[in-house]
Image: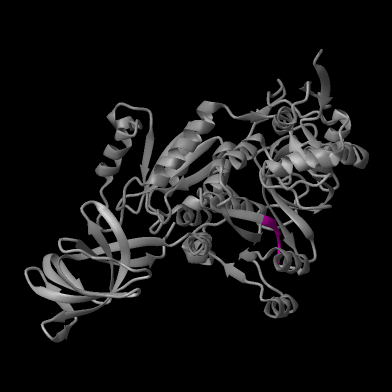
Amino acid sequence: MAVKTIEVEDNVTVGALADQLMIPATKLIAELFKNGIMATINERIDFDTAQIMVGELGMEVELVKKVVEEAPIKRPAAVVSDKAQSRPPVVAVMGHVDHGKTSLLDAIRGAEVAKGEAGGITQHISAYKVTHGDRSITLLDTPGHEAFAALREHGAQLTDLVIIVVAADDGIKPQTLEAIRFARKAGVKMVIAINKIDKEGADVNRIKQQLSENDLLIEEWGGDVITVEVSAKTKQNIDQLLDMVFLVSDVEELKADFDGPAHGLIIEAHMEQGRGPVAEALVTQGTLKPGDFVVAGAAYGKIRNLDGTNKQPITEATPSTPVVMSGFKELPEFGDEFIVVANEKDARAAVEVAKQNQKNNSSQQMSSGELLRVINRSNELQELNIIVKADVQGSLTSVIDSLKTLDTEEVAIRVVGSGVGAVNDNDAHLAHTSGAIIYGFNVSVPNNIKQIAARDKISIRLFHIIYELIDDAKDALSKMLRPEIVETELGRLIVKGVFNTTKTEVICGGEVTKGKLEVPALARVMRGNEVLAEVEVTNLKRGPQDAKEVVEGEMCGMNLKTTSRLLLEEGDKIELFRRETVMRQL
């Protein structure tokens, strides 16, 4: 019999696949259910999962992927034309937490930012345009805490050059190496700013040695890595650092087309009262103006307000300019590319395709890898349902990514809902029905939601520092782990005589040959290598007197509580132990 070929989409609903296979949807749902997938008729499964299900059903069918049409909006090429002009460099400032990245930016900008950050830790990507001499430079401040790895990598991919900040008194740390790795992956040049040289314990030569150990040979040692010794506190050598940044960027001959529709990248996005969705973006090509129709992933809008990062309105933004724009119909995603289109019709068409692709890859679908894991795994996985709300898209991405790293074979995080902005009615309702914890990062809870939470016993946990949020989730997962049973050996008695035996008790005596016997305790009764029974030791006697403990070399009597008649013999061993349940930690 010939194998029938069926063309299906990369992500297909259960109902549509059943129709194409010409089988009842209930049969396919039942097969998915047997393999651990609770799917409804409208939920999507990916192509590989569909293939597995066809095999499980024993059907003579070959599935082939349907070719999906490209988005109607053609993305502009990254190659610049012969009309391209020089543009300012875009520089990311990276490094280990507390090494002074934000303070260094403050010194350059003459602003006070670090004091406003929770715990002194940068928690968002921020962009600034500053002037040095007669030239402009765009600076990106990127978070240093490990939980923001996704944000930091994103920052490296946006930039032409990276300033790696290393504290002279602390040296190279894991996040410093991670920032170096991101810069190398993005293919951008690095300038090493050795900060805090005015601090006690500063050792610049140690930093240079550590750099060479990590394949970064500085110029004065015959390499090509530029280092500048600075102090953000005293502003020592800040001008020299900027001169070096321009020197390195000039070698790259950075150019862009200033004419034509703008495009670039969304750095951050958040909801703002009175303005709605607001996006911070970096223009990479063309010129952006108020009134332009902008498409960013599955969001579009007509630019209502176009501001610089100093919150002042601007009439246009050219390449390498960071901007803040409002007018989107909905919140664009962190990391989305944006592009200016001719009119609202084109914007709607592009968004429809983007939304369809997003739907195909929605959290409802189950990948083939997840399916196989479910098939091969016992049903012992415990899941912690959570809802995550954050102030901006970038933070939301980082929080969720960090939470997913806590998953183990026994316990896992299940994000049942997420979004940007304050905790709302929908979040409270979803938390009530799913038993989820609501985690809020830099967001507020209106009074009416607090009342609902108190009434419905919903747990809302708010944090301003990401690692505190992650630690709380780790504790919640730890409580779901099965306790570990720990046994502690106490001592051993060799039976020398049996004085009384009933159905529930044995009284015997003997010599302690190992350790120390204590009551209360559990014991294993051994005859040779065979375990006869596990019993409870209720009493010890040294002579006629009760004893709390008996040590090695002494004789004693012993009362054993049994669940069935135990026929002890002289020479049997009774090994005492304690059994405790200990809570485990992730």
Q: Is residue 567 left or right of residue 459?
A: left
Q: Measured from the top left, where is residue 455 in percent x and y?
A: 71, 80
Q: Measured from the top left, where is residue 251 in percent x and y?
A: 51, 27
| Direction right: furthest residue | 345
Residue 463 picture quarter: bottom right
Q: What type of secondary structure mainly makes up the magenta span?
A: strand
* Residue at horizontal 9 percent and vertical 73 percent from the top: 555
In the displayed structure, 368 sits above or below 43; it is: above
Task: Choose between 157 and 198: the one closer to the eye.
Answer: 157
Residue 101 visible? The answer is yes
Q: Is residue 331 left or right of residue 202?
A: right
Q: Measured from the top left, where is residue 505 in percent x and y?
A: 30, 75
The part of the chain drawn in magenta is 416-422
* Residue at horizontal 67 percent and vertical 53 percent from the top: 393
Q: Measured from the top left, where is residue 103 in percent x and y?
A: 46, 57
Residue 289 shown in magenta: no
In the displayed structure, 548 sits above or below 371; it is: below
Residue 372 picture quarter: top right
